[in-house]
Image: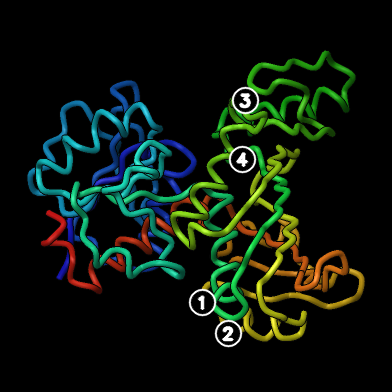
Amino acid sequence: MSYKVAVVGATGNVGREMLNVLAERAFPVREVAALASTASIGREISFGDKVVKAKALDYFDFSDTDICLMSAGSRVAKEWAPKIAAQGALVIDNSSYWRMDRNVPLIVPEVNASALDQGIKKGIIANPNCSTAQLVVALKPLHAEARIRRVVVDTYQSVSGAGKAPMDELFSQTRAVFVADPIETKLFTKQIAFNVIPHIQEFLDSGYTKEEWKMMVETQKILDPDIRLTATCVRVPVFIGHSEAVTIEFERPITAEKARNILREAPGVLVVDKHEDGGYVTPVEAAGEDATYVSRIRKDPTVENGLCMWIVSDNLRKGAALNAVQIAECVINRKLLRRAA
């Protein structure tokens, strides 16, 4: 059986990656529609060995569309996801708008695919924040073994997490440094080239940023509401790939070696953890890859049952496009597509 798939936001970083992942995984696509704003009508976009032309979201008929992958931001998701679902298509949305809606499943397939069996009441499934997705893939098998009490995570997030224009700003600022041109800061609060910025999205009254809050509440919704998590999210001058330094406190004892063995068997995880120069993964190696890489697994001597680790993943793939396509595969494999519609 094959399906008609629409990709909303197809000209953006994640939208293009969604099309790449659909082709790479040989998703059973009968027809694909690349949708964007009216300004992008006719723009050519690669889909495997083919090229498709962008169509306008405003005028598209979804009545014969089976699955719609959305990556066009919260404003578009708020307006269009219910309209598209009302026409019978299952919507898998990458924005933050629907994630905390109690009637919308928030899914990472390796972690909580079974939540789909409780129903897709609005015809919408939410994709988590990119930094949350890679984190919970690594936490899930460890939580099952020793039960997690508390997580402290510091993120090192690439500029592609904010879109294509921030990638261009990093490039132009880096070039300006080398040729001694003035540094222009347009999209970031401070210079991003050769710098790090401990500020992603707006500040909340609590002093945390919206990005940090997302990691807290999304981890609880996906994995366990009893897990306490605190985060500091930092933008770094890397084009693709998010990294996380994670400290975990468990209820039950667990050794670094035991955790290493568990993670080696976990779906979606690759352990690269040698105590030698280069015996770990960095964003450069993770870019373009599907896995969530875990390195630097070691005992935390400051708590009774604690571990520290380093987690890296391609934020455009597992953090967004790949996870969305995996959700679509889960829905099909569980025979939930008709029920969702």
List the residue tagged with mark 4: 212
List the residue tagged with mark 1: 267
**Residue 203, label in figure:** 3
Q: Is residue 193 above or below residue 268?
A: above
- Amino acid type assigned to the residue bearing label 1 in the image: Pro
Q: Secondary structure at mark 2?
A: loop
Quadrant of image for the N terminus: bottom left
- Amino acid type assigned to the residue bearing label 2 in the image: Glu
Separation of residues labelled 3 and 4 (CA atoms)? 9 Å
Mark nearest the camera among 3 and 1 is 3
Q: Residues within 10 Å of mark 2 (few under 14, many from 20)?
A: few
The spot of residue 106 in percent (x, y) is 38, 53
List the residue tagged with mark 2: 265
Instruction: Kindly indicate the quadrant of the structure image that contains residue 177.
Output: top right
Instruction: Kindly indicate the quadrant of the structure image that contains residue 291.
Output: bottom right
Mark nearest the camera among 2 and 3 is 3
Separation of residues labelled 1 and 4 (CA atoms)? 26 Å
Q: Residues within 10 Å of mark 3 (few under 14, many from 20)?
A: some
**Which comes before the other along the chain, label 2 or label 3?**
3
Instruction: Kindly indicate the quadrant of the structure image that contains residue 40.
Output: top left
